[in-house]
Amino acid sequence: MPMSELCNAEVITVERNTTVTEACKRMRQNHVGAVVVMDSKNGKTTPVGIVTDRDVVVELVATELDPDVITVGDIMVPSLTVINKSAGLFEAIRLMADKGVRRLPVVDDDGTLCGIMTLDDILLLLAEELGALNKLVEREQKSEAKRRR
C-alpha cells in the first residue's frame, strides 16, 4: 500500500522564520511532537526541515536560549529526509532505519507535501496487522479442533 494511503494528511507546518515559541504552541494545540518547516521558492512551497520537541529541549532549553527570538529555521535539521507518496511501508521503514529518523514527510513527484509518516504510525499499523494475523491463527486452530473431534 502506498504512503499516500497510509500517511497522516494533517501535517502541522510552520514557515522558516516562525519563532520556536510559536512552533511549540502549535505542537501543543495539535498534540504533536514535531512541525514540518516549509519554505517558498519561485511560488512553490516545499518542506525543508523538521523541528521536534526534542530539538527544542536540546537546542534551546538546555542552552538557555530565548525561544521568542530563535526561529525554527535556526534549529531545524538542515538535511530533510522525505519519502515519495508512491513508496511502500517497508521502504519507509528501511529509510527511517538508514537515516535514523522517526518522521518522514510524504511528498509527491514535485516535492509538494502530502502528509507525514511517523514511527508511531507504523507501529500502530503493524500492531493492527499482527492482531489480524493472530485472529486468523486462532480461527484456524479452532476450526481444526472442530474437524478433529
Image (cartoon, rainbow, N blue to C red):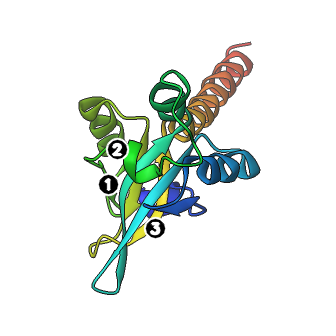
Nearer the observer, 116 or 57? 57
In the rendered image, the residue lying farthest to the top is 149
Kind of element beneath mark 1? strand
Kind of element beneath mark 2? helix
Nearer the observer, 71 or 51? 71
Q: Earlier in the sequence, mark 2 or mark 1?
A: 1
At 34% from the left and 87% from the top, the residue drawn is: 43
Q: Earlier in the sequence, mark 3 or mark 1?
A: 1
At label 1, counting other C-alpha atoms closer than 10 Å, the crowd grade (few under 14, some 14-19, many 20 or more) is many
At 67% from the left and 14% from the top, the residue drawn is: 148
For residue 53, what is the image quadrant? top right
Nearer the observer, 20 or 93? 20
Question: Residue 2: in sight, yes or no?
Answer: no
Question: Residue 127: in sight, yes or no?
Answer: yes
The amino acid beneath tag 1 is: Ile
The reply to whether callout 2 and callout 1 are in contact (CB within 8 Å) is yes
Kind of element beneath mark 3? strand
The reply to whether callout 3 and callout 1 are in contact (CB within 8 Å) is no
Residue hosting label 3 = 114
Q: Which mark is residue 92?
A: 2
Q: How many marks?
A: 3
x%, y% of residue 92? 34, 44
Q: Which mark is residue 83?
A: 1
Q: Earlier in the sequence, mark 3 or mark 2?
A: 2
Q: Nearer the viewer, mark 2 or mark 1?
A: 1
x%, y% of residue 33? 60, 40
At label 3, counting other C-alpha atoms closer than 10 Å, the crowd grade (few under 14, some 14-19, many 20 or more) is some
At 47% from the left and 51% from the top, the residue drawn is: 71
The amino acid beneath tag 3 is: Cys
At 28% from the left and 35% from the top, the residue drawn is: 94
At label 2, counting other C-alpha atoms closer than 10 Å, the crowd grade (few under 14, some 14-19, many 20 or more) is many
